[in-house]
Image (spheres, rainbow, N blue to C red):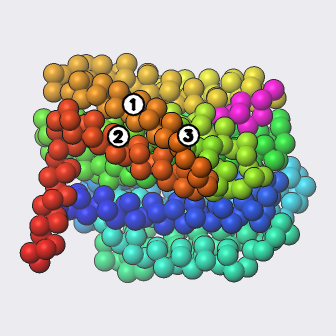
Amino acid sequence: MSTLKKNFLYVLLQQFVLMGLPFLTIPYISRVLGPHGVGHYSYSFSYTTLFINVFLLGSNLYAIREIANVKSDSKQLSRSFSEIFLIRTGLLAIATVIYFICVPLVWKGDAVFYWQSLNLIGAFFDITWLFQGLEKFKKVVTRNITLKLLGFGSVFVFVKDENDLVLYTIIMGAAVIIGNAALFYRLNQYVRLVWQNTEFKRHFKQMLILFIPSFSAMIYSVLDKTMLGIMSTTDQVGFYEQAYKIVYMISSLINISGVVMLPRTSSLITEKRFEKLMEVLRNGVTLTIFLVLPITFGFFVISKDFVLWFLGDKFQPSGTIAMMMAPIIIFKSLGVIFGSWYLVPMKKNKEYTLPIVIGACLNFILNLALIPRFGAAGAAIATTVTEGLILVIQLRFLKNVLKQKSYPMKAFVLYLLASIAMAIVSYEAPLFFHLSLLLTILLKVCVGIVVYSVILMLCRDKVALGLVKKIFLLKAKVKSG
């Protein structure tokens, strides 16, 4: 198996650990803590995330790109790692001090806000950017997974009712600290911390350039919950948070390509292999459309039933909110390819930054207009419109790249029509049966997969035929082995 394919598998596993395990706790936590408890946790956590994102500037994307560029030079690698790590540590130290000043003054000493500071402390130990830049994804996953499993397993053991909200906050924060700290084990195999003759100005300048899109992206991914908590109720934050988690869990699993491909495309650009870069970008867009269109339409069809079954009756409003946010799966997936695969490694900072800044401004305005009247539904509309606008502006900037004849537009139209047909048939299928909620969901999913696959096979789609061929080859290898 190629290194790139292995990295995809490792990052997929990592995404399951980092997001999948919290996702598996959602049904339990939703029922135990209820909308108010979930909303309280999400509202407080949004502020911690706000502090981390603001004070770390644009260092995550920059760090991955910088490490990928110097990984062949061990001395420069250690120097760049040390400089970036020390800058991040200093910025987080300032963030932590200011956060602890704000807790008694702004949030009146709320215990949940105090314990959310564990996430700030955990950020000190976050060096996943080093391993991502080195394309050593196995190291990140294998040293994280056991400790993360232990942390999230503790949720089921110790969190029993609404009174355990503080304990839940402590467990979640401690899992972050332990998981990140584990990455330092045998770190000297890759880099050494350099203290002398360090240069911070160059890194800091580049981080500031990437800070604008990072900060802007944070506005519509974090500030929506903060604004909901201020302008609406904690329950509305809870409804929005659970729908948001489900939608972004789906898009994050699809978007693992961004983490894997940033160092790879950075290397291609450094080696001036631009034809190969265009080929990688073209294949990535095609495969992403092939996957996200049926997933998005399918989720739209099952969202209300799924939320009711997954979260319980108390979170029924989250079903409508999740349906409103379904298009985000398409917008985010394509946005990651255009941003992380091309714009960031090509250092097209203006093209990467401007769409996000415009989107963030629009999101803030829409939140102000919609949240007071519609609550969580208003925030969902604002976020969906924002993500769509960002993608449209990115496409505008990339029009010359996308005009190349090699982009199979006919295939995209086929995937769209097949997804619409799939959604219509799968929506109507349960009307002929009297099934439980879970069986209704499963029937819709199975019917959708069959309809989408049959349409593409009848149309002789290259991607679908290629996947079928690989499946049969894999089965043949298993039987022969």
User: Compared to 103, does 230 lie above or below?
Assistant: above
Which residue bears the numbered disc 1?
Answer: 421
Residue located 63% across and 43% down the image: 304
Circle 3/circle 2 CB separation < 8 Å: no
Quadrant of the frame with the C terminus: bottom left
Which residue bears the numbered disc 2?
Answer: 451
Where residue 458 appears, as percent x and y from the top left, is 20, 35
Mostly what secondary structure, the magenta segment? helix
Where residue 73 appears, as percent x and y from the top left, is 22, 61
Residue 306 visible in image:
no
Extreme right residue here? Answer: 108
Residue located 35% across and 77% down the image: 188
N-terminal-most mark, 1 or 2: 1
Q: Along the line of sight, which residue is nearer the eye, 402 or 124?
A: 402
State the CA–CA distance, disc 1 to disc 2. 8 Å
Which residue bears the numbered disc 3?
Answer: 431
Disc number at residue 26?
A: none
